[in-house]
């Protein structure tokens, strides 16, 4: 048995090709858990790819992926390659690393939400202006985002009369070889239609033994959420058991009335179904709302 473990690199040819595809201007991204991947068959079918990404966006917190708002600026802050420069030689030491600083301009609510996504693990799928997803190919043939070393939100860049207020983010990839050796592109023309879940709030207006009136609004701007269904509301007691809601009506501007035909509810919480099963997409109530039934 040979003790030589040095692998011989097979050089690939670089002939002329009609497929001259490169990543374009990076305009957005999707962040994913470390384990998220897209199988090869799904990657080459735009309809399947769109459905798979939207399904993952509506998953529970542990496995959910997130489509970020579009970038308004993108600065490359790569770590440059390092070399040993002596009188005898000029030798490579380190390949360097990919690092980017995109900026997002939406609102203070989104800026605060992005702060909760700081991370030193997970993956990022870059999206370019040509509707291409920029990913890496795994050893099993599936595609995945690039591993993250750092995703860090920075302080607001405030308007000083010459630039607009923006939210900068620093992204450092963990391994440059995921681009340089196994990078790949997939087209998704409907990428701009991917869900971005809207957090909602429930304001309790009236609580009676057999009637609860609430207003459901978008957490960021207070817009009333209309069109929720009877089954979207879940009322539980303090032990977590579901209480029956017999009657349901919508008054408009996000106001809903829940009713009970006999008996009385007990103290508990009101919540909405998860985004994956909610009749209206894409909304989520982050935390249940306390309901105190008058005695």
Image: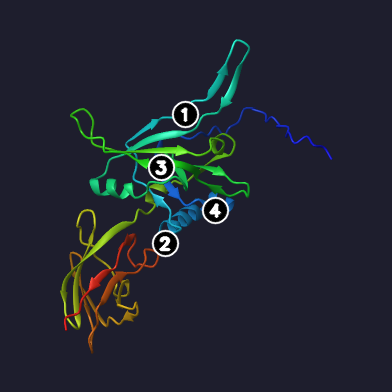
Give above or below for 270 relative to 175.
Answer: below
The disc, 3 or 4, on the residue closer to the chain's N-terminal end is 4
Tell me the tag on residue 60: 2
Please name the residue shown 18% across and 67% down the image.
252
> Which residue was labeled with disc 3?
151
Question: Which type of secondary structure does the marked residue at label 1 adopt?
Answer: loop
The reply to whether callout 4 and callout 1 are in contact (CB within 8 Å) is no
Marks 4 and 1: which is nearer the front? 1
User: Cα distance, mark 2 to mark 4?
Assistant: 21 Å
Tell me the tag on residue 42: 4
Question: Which type of secondary structure does the marked residue at label 3 adopt?
Answer: strand
User: Cα distance, mark 1 to mark 3?
Assistant: 15 Å
Marks 2 and 4: which is nearer the front? 2
Furthest-right residue in this view: 1
> Which residue was labeled with disc 1?
79
The disc, 1 or 2, on the residue closer to the chain's N-terminal end is 2
Question: Which type of secondary structure does the marked residue at label 4 adopt?
Answer: helix
The reply to whether callout 1 and callout 3 are in contact (CB within 8 Å) is no
Tell me the tag on residue 180: none
User: Cα distance, mark 2 to mark 3?
Assistant: 21 Å
Marks 1 and 2: which is nearer the front? 1
User: Where residue 171 sits: x, y (%)?
Assistant: 41, 38
Give above or below for 142 relative to 154.
Answer: below
Please name the residue shown 33% across and 47% down the image.
114
User: Where residue 115 sits: x, y (%)?
Assistant: 32, 47
């Amino acid at each position: 048995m040979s003790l030589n473990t040095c692998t011989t690199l097979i050089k690939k040819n670089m002939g002329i090709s009609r497929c001259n595809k490169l990543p374009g201007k990076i305009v957005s991204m999707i962040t994913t858990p470390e384990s998220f991947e897209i199988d090869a068959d799904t990657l080459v079918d735009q309809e399947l790819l769109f459905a798979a990404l939207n399904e993952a966006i509506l998953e529970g917190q542990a496995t959910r992926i997130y489509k970020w708002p579009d970038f308004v600026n993108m600065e490359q802050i790569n770590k440059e390659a390092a070399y040993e420069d002596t009188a005898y030689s000029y030798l490579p030491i380190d390949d360097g690393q990919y690092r980017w600083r995109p900026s997002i301009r939406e609102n203070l609510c989104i800026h605060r939400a992005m702060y909760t996504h700081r991370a030193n693990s997970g993956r990022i799928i870059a999206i370019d202006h040509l509707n291409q997803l920029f990913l890496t190919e795994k050893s099993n043939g599936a595609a995945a985002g690039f591993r993250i070393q750092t995703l860090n939100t920075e302080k607001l860049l405030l308007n000083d009369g010459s630039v607009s207020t923006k939210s900068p983010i620093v992204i450092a990839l963990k391994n440059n070889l995921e681009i340089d050796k196994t990078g790949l592109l997939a087209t998704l023309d409907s990428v701009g239609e991917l869900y971005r879940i809207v957090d909602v709030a429930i304001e309790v207006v009236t609580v009676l033994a057999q009637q609860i009136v609430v207003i459901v609004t978008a957490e960021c701007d207070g817009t009333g959420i209309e069109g929720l269904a009877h089954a979207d509301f879940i009322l539980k007691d303090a032990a977590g058991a579901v209480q029956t809601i017999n009657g349901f009506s919508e008054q408009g501007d996000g106001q809903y009335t829940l009713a009970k035909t006999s008996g009385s509810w007990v103290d508990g919480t009101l919540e909405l179904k998860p985004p994956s099963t909610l009749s209206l997409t894409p909304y989520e109530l982050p935390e249940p709302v306390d309901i105190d039934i008058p005695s």
